[in-house]
Amino acid sequence: MAPVAMRTAARSLSDAQPVPYWLEDPGKPGALPALTGTETCDLLVVGGGYSGLWTALIAKERDPGRDVVLIEGREAGWAASGRNGGFCAASLTHGLGNGLARWPEELATLERLGEANLDGIEAAVRGYGIDCAFERTGEIDVATEPHQVDELAEMYAEAERLGLADGLQLLDREAVRAEVDSPTFLGGLWDRRGVAMLHPAKLAWGLKEACLGLGVRIHENTRGHELARAGSGMAVRTDYGRVLARQVALGTNVFPSLVKRLRHYTVPVYDYALMTEPLSEEQLASIGWRNRQGLGDSANQFHYFRLSEDNRILWGGYDAIYPFGGRVSAERDQRPETYLTLAEHFFTCFPQLEGVRFSHAWGGAIDTCSRFSAFFGTAHEGRVAYAQGYTGLGVGATRFGADVMLDLLAGERTERTELEMVRSKPLPFPPEPIAWAGIGLTKWSLARADANGGRRNLWLKTMDRLGLGFDS
């Protein structure tokens, strides 16, 4: 980074609060009491992020008489569900390209189910009166290098060939800059209907309130420590008691699974974001952005960015930090060197916003698996179901995962459970130090590909053949 750019970036960060912007909202609900003693229920849901909240809500919708308990180690929505970028995508496969590479025969079905899932999220938001600034504005994948223009055109052509281009619009340089004006934008592919923008923490809090309204018993500051058989059901030990349940659904994602054999299937990756102060009318006019789409550039080390309800810009991504040993630690939620990089990139993208300052800077871990999209299954002879590995796309896909877990617990053969995506598993990550070395080499190779016209080296080509991956 040049000295002048570094000084500009540093000045913009001088007042940034080291907390997630979304979680500072004055409407944040108070914590519910921790579980004490022994409770019994039909279904225990472990985890109070999107995955657990959707599971508890849909379980009660399917069977209002089912006795459902949800436990959360801290407060609902405090982790990835409350601090993400707020991109709620229809895709269940981390994008069309990843889905085509892994499940080409069932991609049309996956796309249809993903669209229905996003429709279901919108219906729930409306039906339960969840005030989470839900805007179905779509998302533009932006090309910032010439080879990315060609890649987006190829992806659009492939979508047309498969009959999946409805709602997609290919944009040339002039057209994309008419939507959002940056001198770095060379083209774009706008998914006009397949992504919504929302306030992530308010979605979690709204789902919590909806669950309570349907009779779900929620205990916060209640961590599940151990999962074991108990008669014909299961028992989960907590800090001050235990829960006896006929069935258990696990929505712990980045945190160590209570089913220990699953722990090698995901690694924690730290993602970081900045939020600007609210833009003035003049500042907003200087970049356009009248249609309020989400945006993401097309590099391997990509940025994602969007407008908040009060016209701040969230700017995140690029770095993806894997800690040796895969240990999740609050100390890693802050990374000033990444904030400097992100701020410098922001002003490169939007030089007309020079002088804008950042109000918040934060980070946190997400659960990443080697196929970039969630995997599912059961344990303890079908008494326990799990869904994890959303790899940053869980805002939307967790609702689908909730349906899958409930189908599996019911022992039902449904369109969802018959999917190869649902029946298969990703390749697990190797033990240390092999995982550390492999992820490091992959990150280096991805950065080289970005700098060399997208050309993938032998390591990346080998990873592609093995179905392994690691992305920012």
Image (cartoon, helix red, strand yellow):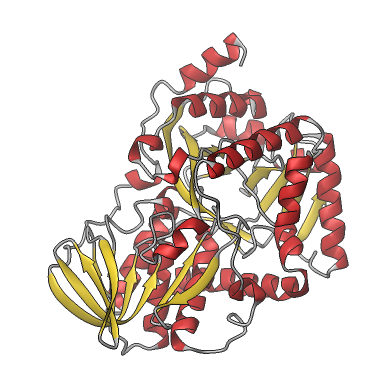
Quadrant assignment, res 381? bottom left
Q: Residue at x 63, y 82 (%)?
A: 418
The percent coordinates of residue 470 (x first, y second) are 62, 47
Query: Residue placed farthest to the left in the image?
Result: 37
Q: Quadrant of the C terminus?
A: top right
Q: Quadrant of the N terminus?
A: top right
Q: Residue at x 55, y 54 (%)?
A: 391
The percent coordinates of residue 55 (x first, y second) are 41, 73
Q: Residue at x 20, y 62 (%)?
A: 32
The percent coordinates of residue 467 (x first, y second) are 69, 57
Q: Is residue 191 visible?
A: no
Q: Is residue 63 above or below residue 193?
A: below
Viewer-nearest residue: 437 or 126: 437
Viewer-nearest residue: 204 or 375: 375
Viewer-nearest residue: 453 or 7: 453
Quadrant assignment, res 183? top right
Viewer-nearest residue: 114 or 140: 114
